[in-house]
Amino acid sequence: MPETPSATPLLDDDALDRLDDFLESDRVNAEALDLIGTHGFLVALAIAPREIEPAVWIGELFHGEPTFTNDDERHDILGLLEALKANAISALEQGQLPELPFDLELGGIPPEETPVGDWCAGFMEGVFLDEPAWFEGNEENAATLLLPFMALSGLFDDEPDMADFSSDTQRQERLVSQLPELTLDLYLHYRVPPEKPKPSPRKKKPAGRKGRS
């Protein structure tokens, strides 16, 4: 049985702290994603079937234009966001698991009241940016793969289909522990097309022999 790959940090602690300080500052819209939500949002963009223009996803993440102190700060913050997304792509491309910025357990607390729920809500915000691309081709399969993120986000608690999930705490805990693997499953589904079977070789006629007329 193959070993589970170790989790790969997408930014170092210093970079995460700088990003967190900025996102929590009063220079950012109060509706903007926090660090945990931003992490989930950018991992979703790393997996997304189609590329989203930076101007679009940056505007969605911040809910408008933040107030940067100067061009250096703008370059630093936007560079950290781009780096997190690029590092997620690189890790998943190599079959590695992204390290998530929280403990992979709920401890009996409803997901939406934990960083797990915040991260999954941020992930789903990334999905919503180009929802048709995630579901076109095979809507049922896509819904199955995205179900853990949807259910743990708390954004769909009013949906009748989520009632059973919300009451199944053991299933919730199991899915939380599997979140890094589930992101890799999604990446493989959307970004790594299945190999096409090789065509059968054509039968060759012996050289120098012609068919009879």
Image (cartoon, rainbow, N blue to C red):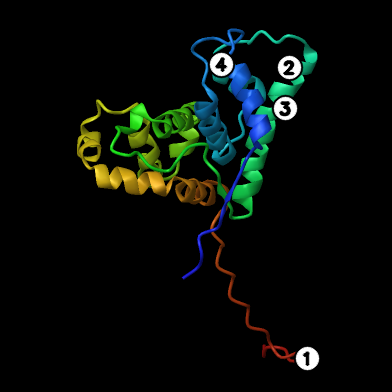
Tell me the SS state at disc 2: helix
Q: Nearer the viewer, mark 4 or mark 3?
A: 4
Residue 49 has which mark?
none
Camera-nearest residue between 204 and 141? 141
205 versus 65 height, above or below: below
Percent coordinates x, y for residue 89 in the rendering: 63, 43
According to the picture, the residue beneath numbered tag 1 turns out to be: 208
103 versus 115 height, above or below: below
- The quarter of the picture where the C terminus appears is bottom right
Percent coordinates x, y for residue 23 in the rendering: 58, 18
Tell me the SS state at disc 1: loop
According to the picture, the residue beneath numbered tag 4 turns out to be: 24
Decide which of tag 2 and tag 3 comes sooner along the chain.
2
Camera-nearest residue between 103 and 69? 103
According to the picture, the residue beneath numbered tag 2 turns out to be: 74
Percent coordinates x, y for residue 35 in the rendering: 55, 26
Decide which of tag 2 and tag 1 comes sooner along the chain.
2
Decide which of tag 1 and tag 4 comes sooner along the chain.
4
Residue 79 has which mark?
3
Mark 3 belongs to which amino acid?
Gly
Residue name at image x 61 percent, y 29 percent: 52
